[in-house]
Image (cartoon, rainbow, N blue to C red):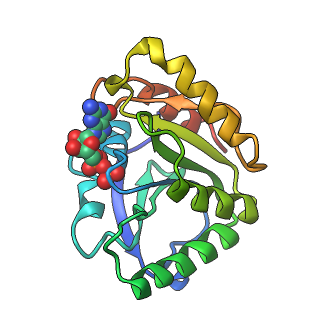
Amino acid sequence: MFAGPIDFLKGVVAMSGLPPADRVEVCFAGRSNVGKSSLINALTGRKALARASNTPGRTQEINYFTAGDTHYLVDLPGYGYAEAPVAVVAKWQALLKSYLGGRQTLRRAFVLIDMRHGIKKVDEEILKLLDRSAVTFQVVLTKADKIKTSEHEKILTQVRAALQKHPAAYPEIVVTSSEKGDGIETLRSIIATMS
Ligand code: GDP
């Protein structure tokens, strides 16, 4: 795993607030309620960690966590809030675009998709942005415990098919359940071995 503790570093609202690009960095994206905080908590083994980024006022920030001395884990705000004001969404999209297009040390984006729902229209927006930004993204299916194991392969086939049209997609999909712990170690080692 990471050599050292995982800690909340800061919430960033503008490119000027980003920490120095001196570590390997991965980010996490997903529509609100997809299970992003639960996954980050499971990954880090620290229950209250991602809650810090889910408190009101922090939801539109890019939240940085330090993982040992070598990695940053970056929690991007959840998208798809129907009720978010247009101006807030526009500001957030501009920051996201600058971040994805300009962060040299960003190695991969993990896009979380609820395994029950698959890739939806709201997810396609971010996938297209990742394509345009040439940021490799890997799909992480969440809440696998809510789906019968016998259904997994069918869903994986659908998701793989949807990824065909995305040049930035990493072919391997990670199936996870934060509730049961499935896929967490796999994801951890994917990140830890990234350099
Ligand atoms: P976020 O908005 O993406 O940060 O989502 P949360 O992590 O807050 O999770 C949203 C809801 O889904 C909560 O009620 C969680 O308890 C539930 N949830 C998250 N991950 C899992 C999972 O792996 N399995 C199950 N059954 N529920 C989950």
Q: If the image is split into quadrants, where does the C terminus sit?
A: top right
Residue 4: percent from left, percent from top: 40, 43
**What residue appears at the point 49 percent right and 83 percent down from the top-left corner?**
90
- The quarter of the image that holds ligand 1 is top left
**What residue appears at the point 44 percent right and 49 percent down from the top-left corner?**
67
Residue 24: percent from left, percent from top: 61, 53
**What residue appears at the point 75 percent right and 59 percent down from the top-left corner?**
134
Is any part of residue 46 visible from this angle?
no
**What residue appears at the point 43 percent right and 63 percent down from the top-left corner?**
79
Residue 187: percent from left, percent from top: 50, 33
- Of 134 and 165, the residue lying toward us: 165
Task: Please state if 150 lies on the left or on the right of 98 as rendered.
Answer: left
Residue reaching furthest to the bottom? 87
Residue 85: quarter of image: bottom left
- Of 29 and 20, the residue lying toward us: 29
Placement of 52 over or under 83, stated as above or below: above
Placement of 146 over or under 166, stated as above or below: above
Placement of 43 over or under 28, stated as above or below: above
Is any part of residue 195 visible from this angle?
yes
Task: Please state if 153 lies on the left or on the right of 58 as rendered.
Answer: right
Q: How many discs mark residues in the rendered view? A: 0
Residue 194: percent from left, percent from top: 64, 41
